[in-house]
Amino acid sequence: MFYHSKELQFKARVSKPDPRFARLLLEQFGGGNGELKAAMQYFVQAFACHNPYPDKYDMLMDIATEELGHLEIVGATIQMLLSGVNGNLKDAAEKTDVFGEGTSKDDMIHSVFSVNPQFGVLTGGGPRLTDSNGVPWMGSYVNANSDLTVDLRSDIAAESRAKIVYEYLMQFTDDKDVLATLNFLMTREVAHFQQFEAALDTIQPNFPPGVLQSDPRYSNLYYNNSVGQDARGPWNEGESTGLGEEWQFIDNPRTHVLETDGLTRLEPEGTDRTEASVRSADRKLSKQRSREIRSTTPEKNQQWCDYSEAEDTLREPVEQD
């Protein structure tokens, strides 16, 4: 069950109307990196965690719910930034200045509504589930693969993208009240990033993502696919970060492919892993992951919640001071 508290999580304020910035802020309301995308992504991902990983289910639902609260903060801020627009639009008979005293109507139409005309024409001065250019929110924004080692990495990336959008948005307003709200929302992205990172660390092994461990013949090859001065770094020399293998720098990729018959006659180099050890690891991890899910998910007579536990909680006496 969801409950709505009428108080916002953060005290959102606006010093004065700013339809231009309201349009930009739509990016975090209905855009591909916005708050609704985050809420729906974590909400959908949580379902696969319910039985095998109830702790991650709890975390994902908690953060998804907080993201809905952030969506409300963004929507409220947009509404305040559009203060007066809706009332002036309603005064249709008088043909009043919709955009306020001292503002060029032509300039405002060009900078706000010509790029996203439906923002004004359909909503009449309120937020709409689109990005800043009027592209409708889409379910395809949501990434959910039912594998925590994949989903949590998607979530870390989602928080990174949302954080940088807030960072960019802060360059487009001088309103100290709005900046305070954006700073809060940006900082919560950093908090969620760390929470997802910590949750991923509790799943061992978690690299590579998924179950299959990858083929040692190809996992540490770096192909020099460009002509000119070559750059070297920890991505193509030394030890690889995840598998701990020695990077093999292939200076001439075409020759390498031809000499190995399209990489079919290739032996692992710079690694202790073998095809046999990988197959063994694949079988072991496959059984482990399958057992974690099967052991907690009955095939018949399932129920999502145990209401008796909830009743017991309600019966617990409340301690008095």
Image (cartoon, grey):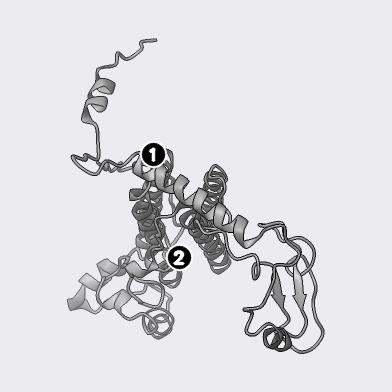
- Name which residue lies at 32% across and 81% down: 117
Q: Is residue 201 left or right of residue 265?
A: left
- Name which residue lies at 45% across and 70% down: 24
Query: Relative to 226, does residue 156 appear above or below in the rendering?
Result: above
Residue type at tag 2: Asn
Image quarter hosting the C terminus: top left
Q: Is residue 186 visible?
A: no
Where's residue 287, x and y in %?
45, 47
Any mark on residue 54, and which? 1
Query: Relative to 131, does residue 69 appear above or below in the rendering?
Result: above
Label 1: state its secondary structure.
Answer: helix
Q: Is residue 289 left or right of residue 119?
A: right
Q: Is residue 52 visible?
A: yes
Where's residue 116, x and y in %?
36, 80
Q: In the rendered image, which quarter is residue 98 located in?
A: bottom left
Where's residue 206, x and y in %?
56, 51
Image quarter hosting the N terminus: top left
Tell us which disc is closer to us: 2 or 1.
1
Residue that carries the numbered disc 2 in the rendered image = 33
* For the residues bearing labels 2 and 1, Cβ distance under 8 angstroms: no
